[in-house]
Image (cartoon, rainbow, N blue to C red):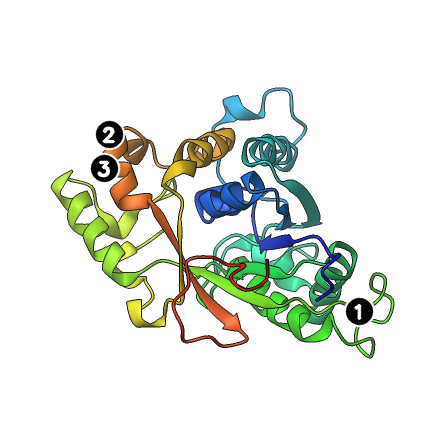
Amino acid sequence: MSARQPLALLALYAHPDDESFGPGGTLARYAAEGIDVHVAIVTDGAAGEADAAFLTGFPSLAARRSQELAAAGRALGVTMHELGYGDSGMEGSPANHHPDSLYQASLDEVACRLVALIRTLRPQVLLTHDPTGIYYHPDHIKVHHAVNLAWEWSGDRAFCQESGPEPWQPERLFWNVISDRWLKRMVRFLRLLRQDPSRFGRNGDIDLTRLGTADEEITTRIDVRDQLATKRAASAAHASQGGGDPLLRRLPLFIQKGFFGKEAFVQAQPAAPIQRSDLFAGLR
C-alpha cells in the first residue's frame, strides 16, 4: 500500500438502514477520525413496510427511503452510493420474482458493479453482511456473496475488465456480526420487558433466538460508546422503517452503552485469528 494513498473504508450493504442499524457506530467513528468512509447500498428498499403517512409527497417508498438514506449519511459523516436494484423482500415473497430485483440479478453482474466502486474509491477496508445476512434475508446473503467475489476480482484485470479504472486490491474484508453471548443477554432482557425475542424488529420477522456468531469466531470489536448518539441520529433518519427499535432507544444511556457500546466483526480476508480493536490496525 502506498503511503500516499489516503485511508478509505467502503461498507457494502443490501438496504437503506442496514448501514445505520448495523455498523453505524463504526462508520461514524472512522469518519470522525478523518478516514474517507463510503457506503454502497445495493437495493432500493421498496419491499419494506411503511405507514401511508410516510409516503406523502413521494412517488414511491423507494424515493422516500433514498431521502432517508441521504439524511443518515449526513448524520454519520459518510458518502452514500446507491446501486438501485429492486428490494427482493424476505425469502418466498412475491418481490423475489420481480425481474428488477436483486434476487433475480446475476451474481457476477452485481459483483462487477461492486468491483467498479472498489477500483474507483480504492479502500483499504471493506465491510459487509456475514454469510447468514444476520437474519437470513436473501438480499443480505446475496450481497455477502457478491462482496466476496468483488474482493477476489477487484485486484485482477482479468475480471470485470470494463469495471472501473486500474485494479485495486483492498487489504481487509470484514463481516459485521452479532455475538451469540450478546444476543442471549438481549433475549433475557427483552423477556423481562415482556417482549417476544422471536418476533423482533418493525415487522416482527426476526427471531433473535436463532441468530448470533460464536464469540471465539469474532476477531474485532470496535468501541462505539462515543458514537451512540450519532448512530441513533442516523437510525432515526430511517423514520419509515421505525428509526431503530423505539423500546431500546428509550433505555437510559448507561444501559445503551452496556448493550450497544461495541460492534463486532469477523475478519474474513485475510483470515486473522488475532483479536483487534481497530479495523485499520497496522495500516495507518
| Disc 1/disc 2 C-alpha distance (Å) | 47 Å
Find out whether the residues at labels 3 and 2 contact each other: C-beta distance under 8 Å: yes
| Disc 3/disc 1 C-alpha distance (Å) | 45 Å
Q: Amino acid at mark 2?
A: Pro
Q: Amino acid at mark 1?
A: Pro
- Location of mark 3 (residue): 255
Vertical side of 203 occupied by 221: above or below: below
* Residue at x 65% of width, y 63% of height: 104
Q: Is residue 222 left or right of residue 268?
A: left
Q: Amino acid at mark 3?
A: Ile
- Location of mark 1 (residue): 167
Query: What is the count of numbered marks?
Result: 3
* Residue at x 17% of width, y 45% of height: 189
Which sits in the foreground, 191 or 92? 191
Q: Is residue 28 left or right of residue 74?
A: left
Which sits in the foreground, 178 or 247? 178
Q: Secondary structure at mark 3?
A: helix
- Location of mark 2 (residue): 252
Marked residue nearer the N-terminal end (1 or 2):
1
Marked residue nearer the N-terminal end (3 or 1):
1
| Disc 3/disc 2 C-alpha distance (Å) | 5 Å
